[in-house]
Amino acid sequence: MADFESIAKQFVEYYYKTFDENRNNLAPLYRDESMLTFEATPLQGTAAIVAKLVELPFQRIEHQVATIDAQPSNTTGGIIVIVSGALLVEEERRPMSYTQTFQLLPNNEGSYFVFNDVFRLVYPAA
C-alpha cells in the first residue's frame, strides 16, 4: 500500500497552490466522471468543474490549511482526504472557514485524480 498520508499531503499542497495561482491548471486533476459539489451545487466532468472554479467572483485567494485527514477508501488504492482551513479572498483580511473533501483514485499512470470533491464554507453557529 502506498503511503496514503504523504500522498494526501502532497496532493493538498499542490491543489491549493495551483488553485491560488491559476484555477485553469486544475483541469488535469479531474476526469469526465469526476464530480464537484460546491456549496450544494453538483457539477460533473472536467469542463463543468473547471468552469465553476474559474467563474468564482474573485481573482486573488489564499488557502490556509489547518488540518488534513486521510484514509484509504477502497481496495484499489483510493484515498479520502478531508481538509479544513481558512480562505483569504482579495484584500479581505478576515478569513472564512471552509472544509473540503476529496476522493482520490489511482489514474493508472502512477498518480491520482479527483473522483469526488465536496466544498463547503463553514459559518459560525448562530
Image (spheres, helix red, strand yellow):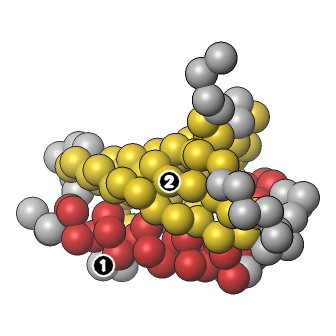
Q: Quadrant of the N terminus?
A: bottom left
**Residue on which disc 1 sits:** 110
* Residue lying at 57% horizontally and 55% vertically, measured from the top left: 86
Quadrant, the C terminus? top right
Quadrant for residue 106, please give it. Answer: bottom left
- Nearer to us of marks 1 and 2 is 2
Instruction: Determine whether 64 is above or below 68 in the image.
Output: below
Q: CA distance from mark 1 to mark 2?
A: 28 Å
For the residue pair 55 and 90, the one nearer the viewer reads as 90
Identified by mark 1, the residue type is Gly
| Image point (58%, 65%), residue name | 63
| Amino acid type of the residue that numbered disc 2 sits on in the rendered structure | Gly
Sort mark 1 into few (<14), some (14-19) or many (20+) by Cα contacts within 10 Å. Answer: few
Comes first in the chain, label 1 or label 2: 2
Question: Can the viewer see residue 82?
Answer: yes
**Closest to the observer, 10 or 115:** 10
72 horizontally vs 83: left or right:
left
Q: Residue furthest top?
A: 126
Q: Quick one: 90 or 1, which is closer to the camera?
A: 90
